[in-house]
Amino acid sequence: MIVTPVTKLLGIRVPIVQGGMQWVGVPSLAAAVSNAGGLGILTALTQPNPDALRDAIRETRRTTDKPFGVNITLLPTINPPDYEGFARAAVGEGVRIFETAGNNPKKLIAYLKGEGCIIIHKCTTIRHAKSAEKLGVDILSIDGFECAGHPGEEDVPGLVLLARAAQELKAPYLASGGIADSRGFVAALALGASGINMGTRFMCTIESPIHDRIKEKIVAASEQDTIHIFRTMHNTARVFKNKVSTEVVAIEQRPGAKFEDVRDLVSGQRGRQVYELGDPEYGIWSLGLAAGLIRDIPSCEDLVGRMEREAEEMMRGMSRHLKAKL
Ligand SMILES: Cc1cc2nc3c(=O)[nH]c(=O)nc-3n(C[C@H](O)[C@H](O)[C@H](O)COP(=O)(O)O)c2cc1C
């Protein structure tokens, strides 16, 4: 058993968390991860409105009696979604674990703390992690440059970022970004993390709701198959490298390029269609460097069980090896 402050705080067996994922973090996946002994997370904004989130929470409860969480991602957008409504709906349904991510989380964190919730706050810099610590979050999720989705603008990979977290943070933290196997898991623990957070790896499981052709594309992908869009807009996102994302980057390079110039190409609905139609070239979809490590499409139970078992063996093997050397 790998017991850490995170397993104790969250009431889970293995310190493996499935990060929020737009269009992917739905009841089937969250429940499967929680049933496997990790923490599954529903993504609030995948639902059209707070009532639909209530239904998703109920559906998840029907398939697991283990703890699970809800991700609320604060987006840099002019017309923000009803964050408060989503948060109130989840709290009203009895959810007590939240993953927060994105800009200006102060108000949301204050509300959730007031309701006695446990908050995992995801960030990409030590500066933001320390501010979130001051706001009272319980667990930090430290997302390195390898990650799918938004790695921030400072480009610090996990190896340095996590060692910096060990120097600076008091709260327990999860290592996030670039982890897909037991080697990454053990490395994260060695870097002072109390567990790991994975996105890309969980996309490629039996219970993940995306089309099989996309899962197969991830298995076939290497660590060279991602690209950063929105660098010029200071809202960098690591996504699958295809015709659409390559075109977006080319348009961004044009003098005076604006978001309007790429709006249609990057539309969330087009990204969603990728998962429904199974056409990896149809739109923009998030993918991390960890894709290069993925070789199969296991059930969440097999994946979490395998990572737990192999990590334990690896740590025992390392201590035997080191003792023999001393
Ligand atoms: C398809 C996909 C969608 C994602 N959507 C979100 C999201 O809506 N909100 C969020 O906070 N993080 C999102 N992420 C980031 C993950 O929660 C996690 O931080 C990241 O995937 C970790 O890096 P990894 O993919 O290398 O494991 C997404 C990741 C993926 C792969």
Image: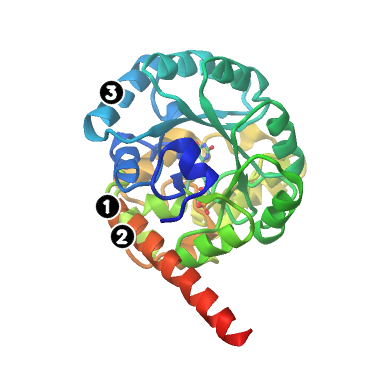
Marked residue nearer the N-terminal end (2 or 3): 3
* Residue 19 appears in the picture as rendered: no
Question: Judging from the image, what secondary structure is the residue with disc 1 in?
Answer: loop
Residue 292, position as x, y percentages in the image: 48, 66
> Mark 2 packing: few (<14 Cα in 10 Å), some, or many (20+)?
many
> Mark 3 packing: few (<14 Cα in 10 Å), some, or many (20+)?
some
Quick one: 299 or 236, which is closer to the camera? 299
Check the picture and name the quadrant holding the C terminus: bottom right
Mark 2 is on which residue type?
Ile
Residue under the image location 54 percent in, 60 percent down: 289
Q: Which mark is residue 206?
A: 1
Check the picture and name the quadrant holding the N terminus: bottom left
Question: Judging from the image, what secondary structure is the residue with disc 2 in?
Answer: loop
Marked residue nearer the N-terminal end (1 or 3): 3
Tell me if label 2 and label 1 are in contact, CB under 8 Å: yes
Disc 3: which residue = 58
Q: Is residue 16 left or right of residue 100?
A: left
Q: Is residue 274 left or right of residue 314?
A: left
